[in-house]
Amino acid sequence: MDLKEIQNLIKFVAKSGASEVKLEMDDFKITIRTGSEDQKGETTFVQQIPMQGAPAQQAAPQPAQPQPSAPAPEPTKEEVDESRYTTIKSPIIGTFYRKPAPDKPTFVEVGSKIKDGDVLCVIEAMKLFNEIESEVKGTIVKILVDDSSPVEFDQPLFLVDPS
């Protein structure tokens, strides 16, 4: 089962109204739980069972760089106009990557024209790399997260000018 099939399964379960679905295959197990209407949440657990004889591949974690605190600058005209931009937010918790692999080019840069369905980045969660696709058409104005940084659910990732 590939990533697209898992994402489609999650969307299907969310729309179906089922509270929990478990799928168990030879090499992995998936449990999808949706919250009640007052919780309006969805939790997905994906557990991959290691195959015997397969070498474990693990990326070396990047140490977090502490940011020195600086006085807040005066808002510029560009910051004041940010309200007209569309914000693309992280749908999951994980590690944000701007490239599909270390030796590949970035998915998008500031000034890139995007359309619905374009891959903007990947977020690694539990050793699964989830492609984050655009749901809007426009131009990337600002990238709000550094490469290889941890991101939270609903954290802003990109600002897009929809005009």
Image (cartoon, grey):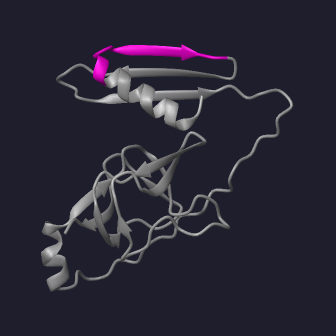
Kindly tell me whether residue 34 is visible in this rendering.
yes
| Nearer to me, 34 or 74 | 34
Q: In the image, is 57 to the left or to the right of 113?
A: right
Above or below, 81 against 4 in this view is below
Q: Is residue 125 above or below residue 107?
A: above
At 68% from the left and 53% from the top, the residue drawn is 59
* Residue found at the very far right of the displayed protein: 53
> Relative to the observer, which residue lies in front, 105 or 77?
105
Residue sitting at 86 percent across and 31 percent down?
A: 53
Query: Residue 46 at what x, y percent from top left?
Result: 54, 28
- Name the spot of residue 93 as percent of width and height, x first: 43, 45
Residue plotted at (49% across, 27% down): 45
| Quadrant for the C terminus in the image | bottom left
Q: Position of residue 88 (x, y in %)?
A: 30, 56
Task: State the image quarter where residue 79 is shown.
Answer: bottom left
Residue 75 seen in this snapshot: no
In the figure, residue 38 lies in which quadrant?
top left
**Total number of numbered discs in the rendering:** 0
Q: Answer whether residue 49 is magenta in the image.
A: no
Residue 17 located within the stretch drawn in magenta: yes
The quadrant of the rendering that contains the N terminus is top right
Specify start and end residues of the magenta stretch as a single range: 15-25
Q: Position of residue 111 (x, y in %)?
A: 36, 77
Residue lying at 48% horizontally and 20% vertically, measured from the top left = 31
Taking depth in this image into account, of 63 and 94 the one nearest to the observer is 94
Q: Height in image: 106 above or below 135?
A: below
